[in-house]
Amino acid sequence: MTNQNDIELLYICSDIDAQVLKDVLEDNQLSAMVINDMNSGLAAGFSGGLQGNESKVFVNKKDIEKAKEILEEFKKSFSDEI
């Protein structure tokens, strides 16, 4: 997933959920990438003015349909726990 044109945003969630989802996707042989703007800002030396702590999960465009199926099961697992 090196070319920006080859990836698509799958989901926006907390950093913890994003890391778990990335692991689930990779367990299903799908490449995934997590980008967290807050951590990127901190690494660049910015400490304020950033809203929230959201992470974005990206997958290859060719895998988006399979990734969406996995995402639905992932989200369902949270509702089953309640």
Image (spheres, rainbow, N blue to C red):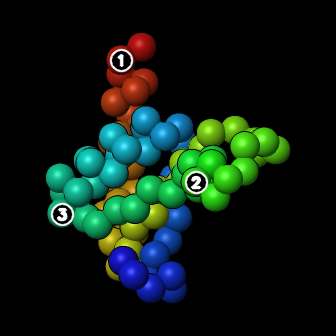
Residue placed under numbered mark 1 in the picture: 81
Q: Secondary structure at mark 3?
A: loop
Q: Residue furthest right?
A: 49
Q: Residue at coordinates 72% horizontally, 43% vertically from top-left?
A: 47
Q: Secondary structure at mark 2?
A: helix
| The one of 46 and 60 positioned closer to us in this rendering | 46
| The one of 66 and 41 positioned closer to us in this rendering | 41
Is 35 on the left or on the right of 31, as rendered?
A: right
| Kind of residue sitting beneath label 3 | Gln
Of callouts 3 and 1, the N-terminal one: 3
Q: Is residue 25 above or below residue 60?
A: above
Q: Is residue 39 above or below residue 26?
A: above
For the residue carrying disc 1, how many other residues have a C-alpha within 10 Å: few (<14), some (14-19), or many (20+)?
few
Query: Nearer the observer, disc 2 or disc 3?
Result: 2
* Mark number displayed over residue 29: 3
Quick check: can you spot residue 82?
A: yes
Residue 5 point in image, percent of width and height: 51, 85
The quadrant where residue 59 appears:
bottom left
Query: Nearer the observer, disc 3 or disc 1?
Result: 3
In the picture, which quadrant includes the C terminus? top left
Of callouts 2 and 3, the N-terminal one: 3
Q: Secondary structure at mark 1?
A: helix
Residue 64 point in image, percent of width and height: 40, 68
Quote the CA–CA distance across marks 2 and 1: 35 Å
Q: Residue at coordinates 34% horizontally, 30% vertically from top-left?
A: 77
Q: Is residue 25 above or below residue 77?
A: below
Dot 3 and dot 1 residues touching (CB under 8 Å): no
For the residue carrying disc 3, how many other residues have a C-alpha within 10 Å: few (<14), some (14-19), or many (20+)?
few
Residue placed under numbered mark 2 in the picture: 43
| The one of 40 and 78 positioned closer to us in this rendering | 40
Of callouts 2 and 1, the N-terminal one: 2
| Kind of residue sitting beneath label 2 | Ala
